[in-house]
Image (cartoon, rainbow, N blue to C red):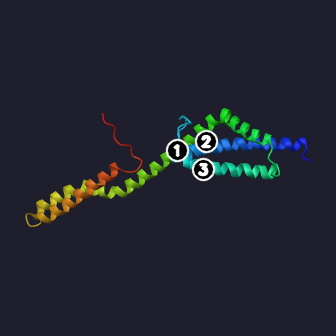
């Protein structure tokens, strides 16, 4: 026969589990579904509803572990009240702070990723840009020195360098993480 102390222990564990499920829900919404803090919680699409199955499976597993370890598998009415009270306490007290922090962490990671992609793109496209900057005057000088017989060859090389330069500029303007220019 369980004692009153055991019941309070189970209630405390279910309250803590309710807090954990609330934290898991906020992290799931921001990190997996991509909801920005401050958006309404009631806005769900079919895709986000399908992705919530993963959250509910994790929440169910967490609740099962708590029930199996603290309550010996016995389900009582106050267990459900503890889960609900813990989740409600989390949403009333902790949710605004956690959503802001996790959203800021997500934005910081996205900014870091964008910065890394920009740096990598710059390193890849830098040789092409240098070839465009240097190649044009060099080809003009060689055309003057070599005269008419080599002009066709040098024009073909110039056309290739210009095409590569245009390709490089086109790729640079469409690199990942770059925002499209705003029309004025």
Q: Which mark is residue 34?
A: 1
State the residue in front, 36 or 75. 75
Q: Which residue is mark 3?
A: 53
State the residue in front, 153 or 59. 59
Q: CA distance from mark 3 to mark 2?
A: 14 Å
Of labels 1 and 2, earlier in sequence is: 2
- Measuring from the top left, give residue 26's x and y in whole percent: 61, 42
- Measuring from the top left, give residue 171's x and y in whole percent: 33, 53
Q: Are marks 3 and 1 in contact (CB under 8 Å)?
A: no
- Measuring from the top left, give residue 36's x and y in whole percent: 52, 39
In the figure, is residue 90 to the left or right of 7?
left
| Residue under the image location 84 percent in, 40 percent down | 8
Q: CA distance from mark 3 to mark 1?
A: 15 Å
In the figure, is residue 110 to the left or right of 86?
left
| Residue under the image location 89 percent in, 41 percent down | 4
Q: Are marks 3 and 2 in contact (CB under 8 Å)?
A: no
- In the rendered image, the quadrant that contains the C terminus is top left
Q: How many C-alpha atoms fall within 10 Å of the one at disc 2: few (<14), some, or many (≥20)?
A: many
Picture quadrant of residue 179: top left
Of labels 3 and 1, earlier in sequence is: 1
| Residue under the image location 73 percent in, 41 percent down | 83
Of labels 3 and 2, earlier in sequence is: 2
> Which type of secondary structure does the marked residue at label 3 adopt?
helix
């Amino acid at each position: 026969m369980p004692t009153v102390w055991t019941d309070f222990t189970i209630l405390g564990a279910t309250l803590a589990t309710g807090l954990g499920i609330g934290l898991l829900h906020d992290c799931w919404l921001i990190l997996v579904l991509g909801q920005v803090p401050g958006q309404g919680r009631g806005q769900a699409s079919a895709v986000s509803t399908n992705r919530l199955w993963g959250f509910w499976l994790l929440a169910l597993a967490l609740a099962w572990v708590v029930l199996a370890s603290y309550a010996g598998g016995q389900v009582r009415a106050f267990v459900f009240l503890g889960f609900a009270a813990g989740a409600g306490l989390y949403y009333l007290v902790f949710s605004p702070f956690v959503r802001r922090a996790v959203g800021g962490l997500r934005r910081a990671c996205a900014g870091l990723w964008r910065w890394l992609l920009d740096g990598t793109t710059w390193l890849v496209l830098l040789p092409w840009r240098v070839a465009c900057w240097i190649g044009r005057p060099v080809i003009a000088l060689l055309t003057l020195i070599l005269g008419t017989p080599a002009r066709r060859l040098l024009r073909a090389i110039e056309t290739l360098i210009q095409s590569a330069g245009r390709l490089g500029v086109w790729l640079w303007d469409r690199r990942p993480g770059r925002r499209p220019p705003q029309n004025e």
